[in-house]
Amino acid sequence: MKFESAIAQNEKNRMSEKLSRAETADARRKHIVETAAICFIEQGFHQTGIRDIAKRAGVSLGNIYNHFGGKTELIAEIATLEAEDLAELQEVLTNNTDPLAALETFVERYLKLCSQPEYAALTIEILAEAMRNPVIVEGFLTNRDSLLVALEDQIAAIRALSGGKPDIPDRDCAKFTLDLIEGLSMRIAFSERKPSKRELNSLKRAVKRLL
Amino acid sequence: MKFESAIAQNEKNRMSEKLSRAETADARRKHIVETAAICFIEQGFHQTGIRDIAKRAGVSLGNIYNHFGGKTELIAEIATLEAEDLAELQEVLTNNTDPLAALETFVERYLKLCSQPEYAALTIEILAEAMRNPVIVEGFLTNRDSLLVALEDQIAAIRALSGGKPDIPDRDCAKFTLDLIEGLSMRIAFSERKPSKRELNSLKRAVKRLL
DNA sequence: ATAATGAGCGAACGATCGTTCATTATATAG
DNA sequence: CTATATAATGAACGATCGTTCGCTCATTAT
């Protein structure tokens, strides 16, 4: 979740011109979501009060309800935004001059993303909420499924090159690959450290063995 | 978490004799923890009030504080109890007439345990709390580390038999094995279904490839 | 028999929760 | 400039939170 806007800062932002109403509203909205995410990471979803978010965002309490329907809408939006980070990773898998190399790059990138402690913390909060709120599940799984399909295709491409007869279906293989990366990520995130060279090498080898 | 007591029901329980004070206190304590676990599974940790637990356990509000220091002590105790379930699984790994078969049995058993929706739900709640409470982390990781060592030894034994030269350290291999099982478990638990034959076969194959 | 212990109880406390709403300020449209 | 729409505000609401407290009473120890 990077919340990069930078979208169309042309039209109205020339020479520090005043922003239009719609623009400031959008900016506020974004700022509130960002702040909420920070709060949820630091304190957890249920330990964070709307007042915490309002105070930290420099916004009045009531105004949050002008932009969002309520607290759960905030975590739902954050879940969607976090899932969108995965879209970027898919691009790594579409560059197919060397499928195996692309897979390795993907492993590195996805590990780097997931093992950020803030990312892991947010994921757990979202997961815990998703357990009891189908709406959050949907936003969370949509982009993930998309990533899974891309990974599955990539694995199929690699397997097609090597010509062997794999006894694990492409789809399962893709899921297992994500499992390995995410499992290692959690351990790294929980111990607040960076992945060691050994761990990264072991991971890459493990992924290759699944092919 | 099965909370089996059956400990020393001899001394005083002969012929439906009255229970001693210490015994009833222990039973209450146990009953409260069990009930708390059910509540946490159904509603989540922070959505559950002490009153919910008290009401459901058929116990007064204040009495809970006679048995427990507070709410976090409850989740901490539950975390420890859940971790103790893993101790049973270790036994599977100590029967070493056929190391590879034992590993397969372990995979099946651990998958069956983790993929119970209640187990998964509780795990996520504990994980979310552990993120901000080191005490919970400790109770959670102690038994898990023990399991990991047992699995590592098992893998070493299997590898010693086959005689190959594995390029993934035993320890990493053990971690990855748990990752694969737990990842699949989460998917199963989230979709509220049982693992298919295909999934289980894929898992076993994946685990073997790591060896 | 009497004293000490601690399980059991529920009212009460202060704090905080998510949300609503009447009100004010401000940007846009006519 | 005036009218309108909406962003922004914070007091207020009712509910619920975790915890404490004084108390009763059955069991255990002396």
Image: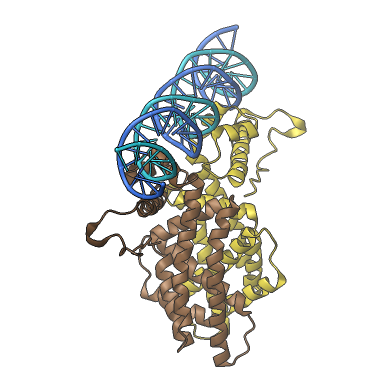
Chain colours: A brown, B yellow, C blue, D cyan
Task: Answer above or below: position of A115 versus C5.
Answer: below
Q: Residue at x 39, y 76 (%)?
A: A198
Q: Position of residue A2 (x, y in %)?
A: 37, 62
The residue nearer to you, when weighing B94 against C25, is: C25
Q: Residue at x 67, y 30 (%)?
A: B19
Q: Position of residue D7 (x, y in %)?
A: 38, 45
Q: Residue at x 49, y 57 (%)?
A: A79
Task: Answer above or below: position of B140 versus B58.
Answer: below
Q: Residue at x 53, y 67 (%)?
A: A144
Q: Position of residue A103 (x, y in %)?
A: 47, 81
Query: Which quadrant of the view contains residue A82?
Result: bottom left
Query: Which quadrant of the view contains residue B181?
Result: bottom right
Specify the quadrant that holds the N terminus of chain A.
bottom left
The reply, left or right, for residue D2 in relation to residue B154 is left
Q: Position of residue B117 (x, y in %)?
A: 64, 55
The reply, left or right, for residue B100 in relation to residue A2 is right
Kindly tell me whether residue A193 is visible in this rendering. Answer: yes
